[in-house]
Image (cartoon, helix red, strand yellow):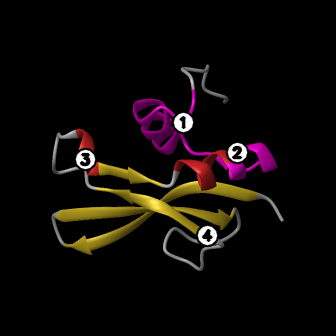
């Protein structure tokens, strides 16, 4: 099973709110998740908009879970990952 760390959309129309989750890569965007790592609110610019469990996130990255580009930028902002080149 290939796992991916990506965003799951929640919230109402025009007010997005996201959960950072670990999912099977074959599932759709809002499908069943394996683990929930935190939340992200893009409508606020404050650093508190990103709430992540850093220990869980680092553990999943060590296990080999792939990271989406958006989640990679969130991890860099929150200090989980160092600025690394984006994989294509």
Q: Which residue is the site of mark 4?
A: 35
Would residue 45 be counted in the magenta stretch? no
Residue found 56% across the figure and 78% down from its top: 31
Q: Which residue is the site of mark 2?
A: 61
User: Spatial distance from mark 1 to mark 2, Cα to Cα?
Assistant: 10 Å
User: In this rendering, would 80 be left or right of 61?
Assistant: left
User: Spatial distance from mark 2 to mark 4, Cα to Cα?
Assistant: 13 Å
Question: Measured from the top left, where is residue 56 in percent x and y?
Answer: 62, 55
Residue 6 quadrant: bottom right
Q: Which residues are magenta?
A: 59-81
Q: Seen from this angle, which residue lies furthest front?
A: 55
Contact check, label 1 and label 2, Cβ < 8 Å: yes
Question: Measured from the top left, where is residue 29 in percent x and y?
Answer: 51, 68
Is disc 2 placed on a helix, strand or loop? helix
Q: Is residue 62 above or below residue 37?
A: above
Mark 2 neighbour class, 10 Å CA radius: few under 14, some 14 to 19, many 20 or more: some
């Amino acid at each position: 099973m290939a796992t991916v760390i990506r965003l799951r959309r929640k919230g109402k129309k025009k007010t997005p709110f996201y959960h950072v989750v670990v999912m099977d890569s074959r599932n759709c965007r809002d499908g069943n998740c394996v683990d929930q790592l935190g939340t992200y609110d893009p409508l606020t610019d404050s650093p508190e908009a990103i709430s992540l469990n850093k220990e869980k996130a680092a553990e999943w990255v060590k296990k080999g879970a792939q990271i989406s580009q958006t989640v990679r930028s969130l991890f860099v902002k929150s200090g989980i990952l160092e600025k690394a080149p984006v994989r294509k």
